[in-house]
Image: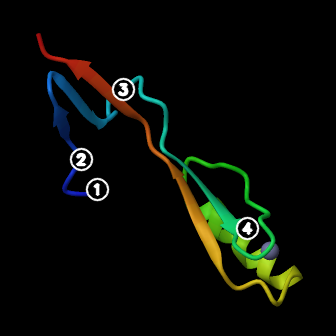
């Protein structure tokens, strides 16, 4: 987590949502050569497995992006 995980601006605070009802953090891997991507998963291992398979069938594709979806929440101080 970055050092700017808690952001205060005026009366608003913004923070990663770690409440029990928060949406899960989700991961996907995307090929930077052809744009194909793995399924979105709550762990990163599935995406890594997809990369290995993608390399095997596309031997010239060597660069990838990891797409991370992280839930955040805001609240206002009064
Ligand atoms: Zn590719």
Q: Is residue 6 above or below residue 17?
A: below
Residue topped by disc 4: 50
Circles 3 and 4: CB atoms closer than 8 Å: no
Circles 2 and 1: CB atoms closer than 8 Å: yes
CA distance separating discs 2 and 1? 6 Å
CA distance separating discs 2 and 4? 30 Å
Which element type, helix, strand or loop, lies under badge 2?
loop
Residue neighbourhood size for the residue with mark 1, other residues' Cα within 10 Å, grouped as few (<14), some (14–19), many (≥20): few
Q: Earlier in the sequence, mark 2 or mark 4?
A: 2
Which element type, helix, strand or loop, lies under badge 3?
loop
Give left or right: position of 73 versus 62: left
Residue neighbourhood size for the residue with mark 4, other residues' Cα within 10 Å, grouped as few (<14), some (14–19), many (≥20): some
- Please identify the quadrant where the C terminus is shown: top left
The residue at the point 86 percent across, 82 percent down is 58
CA distance separating discs 3 and 4? 29 Å
Give left or right: position of 3 versus 57: left
Residue topped by disc 1: 1
Mark 1 CB lies closer than 8 A to ligand 1: no
Q: Nearer the viewer, mark 3 or mark 1?
A: 1
Q: Residue furthest top?
A: 78
Residue topped by disc 3: 20
Q: Quadrant of residue 47?
A: bottom right
């Amino acid at each position: 987590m970055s050092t700017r995980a808690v952001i205060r601006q005026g009366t608003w605070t913004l923070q990663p949502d770690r409440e029990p009802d928060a949406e899960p953090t989700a991961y996907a891997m995307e090929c930077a050569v052809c744009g194909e991507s793995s399924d979105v998963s709550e762990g990163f291992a599935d995406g890594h497995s997809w990369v290995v398979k993608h390399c095997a069938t596309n031997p010239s594709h060597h660069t990838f992006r990891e797409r991370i979806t992280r839930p955040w929440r805001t609240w206002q101080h009064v």
